[in-house]
Image (cartoon, helix red, strand yellow):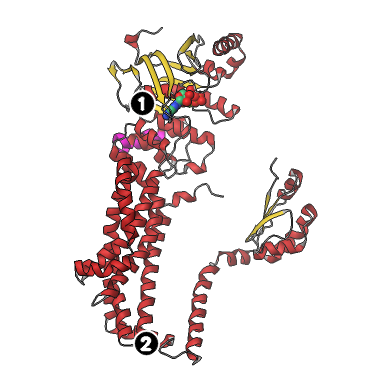
Amino acid sequence: MIQTQTAILHADHIHHTFTAANGQPIPALEDVSLALAPGTFTALIGPSGCGKSTLLRILAGLVKPTSGQVQFGGLALDRPQRRISLIFQKDNLMPWRTVYENIELPLQLAGVAKTEKEQRVAHLLSITDLLGFENHYPAELSGGMAQRVAIARGLINEPDVLLMDEPFGALDALTREQMGQELLRIWATTQATVLMVTHSISEAVFLADRVLVMSPRPGHIIREVPIPFTRPRGIELLTDTTFTQLAAQIRAAIH
Amino acid sequence: MPKPTVTVWMEEGVHSAIFAQQAVVGVFKLPLITYLCCVIGLPPVHPNVHSTQKGRLLMSSITSTQVVSLSTQAPRPLPVWRRWLRKIEWRLLLLPLIGLLLWQGWALLAESNYYADFIVPHPDTVWARLEERWADGSLVTHVAVTLREALSGLFIASLIATALGYIIARVKIFDYLLTPYLIFLQAIPVIAISPLIIIWFGSGLASKVVIAAMITWFPMMIATIVGIRNVSPNLREMMRANAASRWQIFRHLEVPSAMPELLGGLKIAVTLSVVGAAVGEFVSAREGLGYLVMYGRGISDTPTVVLAVLMLTVVSLVLYSLVAMLETSLLSWRKAGKP
Ligand SMILES: Nc1ncnc2c1ncn2[C@@H]1O[C@H](COP(=O)(O)OP(=O)(O)OP(=O)(O)O)[C@@H](O)[C@H]1O
Ligand SMILES: [Mg+2]
């Protein structure tokens, strides 16, 4: 377990209960504690409806947990912070803004000067391989391209923490693999701390330093699997025996 | 399994349709008449054809190999003169032609002696009135007065209605408390209440502005409510996650997102504002196009009445076109990604 003191984002005994429209309580999270060490890549995996998205919303400061506390950089987190970036399951792009304007949005909201904005957007356009598409509208992009725009937007203000909710969920297997590798390449150029929700076990093992496994609802973390592989990681890792063993171990923990 | 459909494009007119038919008939086994129906936009006459739109056939019961064999046929390049002909905006040439026909029809009706001049004045008489009133400058004055009343009313109504619509859309309790009374207000027939408005606000500019505002605020408010309620909750959450302030959410999300609905409402309101101003002028006024209608009626000069009505129409049309142009430029993003 990572020491709480060194963690940049730290959730302490989080409980969260929704109230359904008929007044019935729906316990979504039960006693979730986790700590993210700076610069690490953590994957979160668990059955559908176990509360992963809810946990990410709480960690982003969008939702106040029923009980428990989230600390960011040692301070209690009570509302969304610019230093924490959340990339949603859907791309959530504004259809009336071009690719450039969508990526630029967080900087615009933070009031960053024009020249710096231009530099940073240009940089992200190039690392997400979107150069030449800056003046296109989201409706003119493929699903994978739109997702890359969302990732670029999530990275643009160089967040300390990057929370990703199944960012590749809408993609086919092949694009997914490519995007995963691309994400690792982009991540290597930043010092961000990443927590990524995924449904794919092999994706989790391939990308992360450790994998957290959640139980069915009400979700809590039932297993923590450290991933020992060095970086950079290549696609050949997928056939490595240690890799398949780890994947099997995680699969067993889920069921 | 859904039936496979294929779209056959026939953009080049009847001749190419017949030509294409020879190529396609072997694949689809459709009679020539179907293609002709397609070209002139008649309903489909073949069970395999879903619908015909101008130049387009939507067909079912076609296997994928047949589709492949069709799509591999490359379209022939057009000769230069035909490409040039296609560039001409035929619609723009036809539009005034239809207007001219209507004008001539009107003239024929007036000349037929079937109706008295008092009932159907000759268009030339109306034109003469236009020239007179243009020469002495009174036409411009009347148009300007009505325009000013209509636009002032529209402006005030838009401010109030968008503000009201916004809080109704965002705050439930206001929806609950205000909406019944606002609907009550809207249910009052503006035409019936306009004499009262004149009593309250006098027979000058103010009363017409109030009437124009009363007739335009409702579509603006409904447009605002619908527009703001349609803002994607996912985009709202995305803005919040980026620590956007309330003002930033308003400025960068709610306004651009509601823009299509707002402009739709404005299109309705802008034409209604002219109606409002004219209604006010009918009741009591000394200038304006509505006054001109009443004046013409008073002196039994039907050409003046017709002229004033036509001018009201023109003012409405021009205002509507301006909003339509605004829409095209503001909402150009909506054309993106459409085939
Ligand atoms: N706004 C809400 N109101 C009521 N219940 C909710 C709400 N949001 C989520 N829930 C409930 O909380 C539980 C967890 O939801 P959550 O979206 O966090 O799941 P998830 O792990 O992200 O699932 P998935 O993998 O399918 O995205 C679900 O069972 C759902 O019924
Ligand atoms: Mg989810």
Residue at x-position 27% and y-position 62%: B153
Subunit of label 1: A
Residue tagged by mark 2?
Answer: B128
Q: A178 or B55, which lies in front? A: B55
Q: Position of residue B32 (x, y in %)?
A: 76, 63
- Across and down, in percent, residue A162 comes to 40, 23
Region in magenta: A108-122
Give the percent coordinates (x, y) of residue B211. 28, 65
Chain at numbered mark 2: B
The reply to whether the magenta stretch includes residue B338 is no
Residue A63's label in the rendered image is 1
Label 1: state its secondary structure.
loop
Q: Quadrant of residue B45?
A: bottom right
Q: Does the magenta stretch include residue A113?
A: yes
Judge by depth and name the residue closer to the eye, A96 or A191.
A96
Q: How many marks overall?
A: 2
| Foreground tag (1 vs 2) | 1
- Ligand 1 within 8 Å of disc 2? The answer is no
Predominant SS along the magenta part: helix
